[in-house]
Amino acid sequence: MEFLLTRRVAISAQWSSEPLRRAVARFQRDLEMTLNPGELIPAGRIQLVLARSMAPEQYSIDLQSAESMVIRAADDLGAVYALLYLSRTALGILPFWFWNDQKFEKRELAAVTRPHHAARPAAVGLRGWDFTGGELLEHWNAGAPCLNWEMAFEALLRCGGNFVALPDGKPAELAGAMGLWRLQPEALPLEAPAFDDRYPGRPPRFADSEAEYRALWSAAVEQRKQQKLIWRLGLPARGGEMLPEDGGAPLARQGAELSRVLRAQYDALRAVLPAAPVCVTVSGKTAVLARSGMLDLPDDVVRLWPDNGYGKFVAPRQGQNDPRTPQLPDAGSAGRHGVFFHAAVSDGMAGNCLTMRPAAMELAAQELCDAFEQGARAMWLVCAGCVKPHVYPLDALAALWRDVDADLNAHRTAYLNAYYRAPDGWALQPRQLDDLDTCLKSWPQVTAAFGRWPDQRAGEQLMVCAARAAASAWLAGRTRGPVPALRWAAGDTPFADQLAWLRGVCADALPGLETLQAGCEYAARPTTRLWKDTVLAQVRLYRLCLQGVVLLCDAWSAWCDSHYRLCFVRLGRAAAAFEQARRVLGGCAHGRWASFYQQEETATDLGRTVWVLRSLMALPRAAGDGPDYTAWQREVLGAKAPAAAMLDEPLWSAMEQAGRE
């Protein structure tokens, strides 16, 4: 028996809701994207039946005849997942079809041949994305209102996700309308307003104003009790004075004071919503108390353990202090546990806003599998940034939250085979796929290492932000002591030593990136533009940023040796390298992505880095060519030199064309 899907298929449901309405409309759009409007084939009928006896989010699909299909779903999300399952298996629509510009060759019909399918529960209960560092996504004009967020949420649903981490607002309302839960912001426990805004003049300590705090939290729960929320407990961002200074107090006392606050928030929630999901982020002092058994939390509160920002479950770096202490619960710990894992991070240090995760996916899998074995099964929150540059890691991480034993080597091969095709739409040859696979697998092996640990691989922000910080310090004459922005990695050493460290890191990585770029360019020949816009573009951008930093550091050496013209030339080349990196992104900005890569919205602001470096060129020009500013142009251009002083950039271009330093 087979059920034929056509654009005329009729869909009916036993219940009505906004997520269900949107799911049906999305499925009908999928039919229109992939099928022609044939009239000769009888229209089938799909019935959606509410089956509350099923576990949450589960569904089954049964073919009753060639023209009748019954989908039994436990709830809205069960129905959403069922229709997305049909969309993928019968229509061939992949989870990141929009983000990877999947092309569809329309057919007359699609057949569903499996008589019965029952969904398997995901390995992890709550599965979601955080969009911190997603400024490109937020500021992108996708061509239709809220299309940027709708496509991000749709990709999450197709990956089996069920919640997003967002503040209240229009994107959050859209997520709820699509069936997703919303995780409240960490800085606003229960999304209550700041205490001093609501109770000005009252003592901020919880012990002195407990009644007011409880009233504040109860009102916050009452205000949002109808929303589909994962509630957060914790200390607010402006709650530094809420607890007394520990002053070396025993951990037991500190734990009791924090537990009292969290329990009061929990009681305010449970008084209104006895079964709502609730979590608390376990980091910093909270992690110390939790691992010491000094934090008294109800068992149904999910303890959310964050990584260090780079995919390792150790305490995050605090300035130059990188303790590397474990950041996971002990196996068998009481309560429910989850993790916050970064596929993308935008920290202005070694983040990866525009490039995919710089450390190996195998390391990510090992970390998450270890966390799973230690009890982190209730909730996985993945930082997705602005989605598009991180599609492959997000797809791999979704495979793990569905099945923690997923084979990432097989997944990578399947991912490449699914998205990367020949220009005529046919599948690539095995040898061609092997070339793509080798390139993708090699990426984390050649990224710059800023430390000795496997997770200490740098995203493009190490180069871009460090170059800007070093150039700004040089321009301002602050070159005797350390650059504060580089202390975290280069140490509290003089400026010259910091630059020597930075140059070493980038120069060591350059040969590997040059080899990888050549391999990616070779692998690009038999495939479509997608490869050039994704993996190859990221490799090119990364290599150019490395090159720009090395040139900047070499310019400093020339400056110290009073070789001012050489310094000038090298600074111009450094600026040109970052400008080329900016143009690499410009080459990806076509079609629906024309306004996506606005780096000025991010810490990875290539245009601002170019501007700072070009401004810095004025120093060696003044030292070596001033005060008349015409000697260098006469030396380079001879009789063709203009009488008036040339601007820095035209002069540098003339030097480059003449091959003069």
Image (cartoon, rainbow, N blue to C red):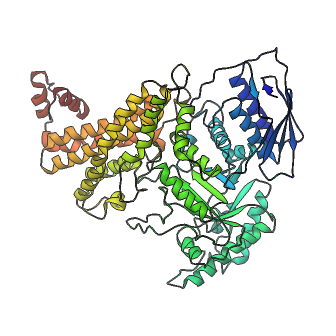
Q: Is residue 420 left or right of residue 23?
A: left
Say how many tags the image has.
Answer: 0
Residue nearest the observer in this picture, 414 or 581? 414
Residue 646 visible in the picture: no
The residue drawn where x is 31% and y is 37% is: 577
Q: Where 64 sits versus 320, above or below? A: above
The C terminus lies in which quarter of the figure? top left
Q: Quadrant of residue 516?
A: top left
Q: Position of residue 615 (x, y in %)?
A: 28, 42
Q: Where 95 sits versus 487, above or below? A: above
Residue nearest the observer in this picture, 471 or 158? 158
Q: Position of residue 602 (x, y in %)?
A: 47, 45
Q: Quadrant of residue 439?
A: top left
Q: Where 401 sits versus 152, above or below? A: below
The residue drawn where x is 41% and y is 66% is: 322
Q: Is residue 284 left or right of residue 487?
A: right
Q: Where 540 sits versus 8, above or below? A: below
Q: Position of residue 155 (x, y in %)?
A: 64, 40
Residue 513 visible in the picture: yes
Q: Is residue 490 left or right of residue 370?
A: left
Pick out the residue farthest to the right.
Answer: 14
The N terminus lies in which quarter of the figure? top right
Q: Position of residue 112 (x, y in %)?
A: 76, 30
Q: Is residue 627 left or right of residue 524?
A: left
Pick out the residue farthest to the top.
Answer: 40
